[in-house]
Amino acid sequence: MGYTSIMAGTSKKENRYADLESGHRLVNLVASGLTLHAASKRLNLPWRTAQEQFSRTLADIADERTKQEVLHTELATLAMMQQAHMPAALRGDTDAARTVLQILDRRSKYLGLDEAIKVQVLGKEVERAVETISQIVEGEIAEVVEMKRIGA
């Protein structure tokens, strides 16, 4: 890696962050019209380090754009599929309804909405948190029982 990676008293994570930061500064300076050589001098970076960080930063940017483009395409495809199956699902077609639910599940996974939510409870807050969670669960159970009772 570059010279920032061998700085005394810094962790690899801190060094990677410093490399990313200087890489982005290099890209911005070059985008503003400086040559890479002039940008490296302005940031007091050795030429070889500047070349490596600039190349790595450009690759990271391209990789992130590619991921975003793929995600956008996948979400658009799911939207079209959902639109195609929704009328049949709303008419009661169970296979179409299952397909729509699978599409919604896939969209949630793509967007990270299916991940568990971490809750940290400390000290005296434990009892109150357990009570709140119990109330939520009891409310959901009561709602399900009521829906079954009315035939929904």
Image (cartoon, grey):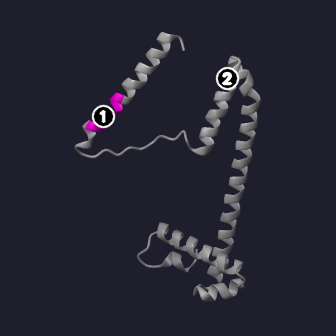
Circle 1 crowding by C-alpha within 10 Å: few under 14, some 14–19, many from 20:
few
Q: Nearer the viewer, residue 133 or 30?
A: 133
State which quadrant residue 74 falls in. Answer: top right
- Residue holding disc 1: 130
**Looking at the image, residue 71 lies above or below residue 126:** below
Sequence-wise first label, 2 or 1: 2
Task: In the rendered structure, find residue 97 and report the number of the disc placed on it.
Answer: 2
Residue visible at 63% across and 34% down? Answer: 104
SS state under label 1: helix
> From which residue to which does the magenta span run?
128-135
Res. 93 image quadrant: top right
Query: Which corner quadrant holds the N terminus?
Result: bottom right
Front residue of 21/96: it is 96
Residue at 52 percent across and 78 percent down: it is 4
* Structural distance between the alpha carbons of marks 2 and 1: 35 Å
User: Which mark is drawn over residue 21?
Assistant: none
Instruction: Look at the numbered disc 2 and give the secondary structure of its residue.
Output: helix
Q: Could you tell me the amino acid type at mark 1? A: Val
Q: Position of residue 35 (x, y in %)?
A: 72, 85
- Mark 2 residue type: Ala
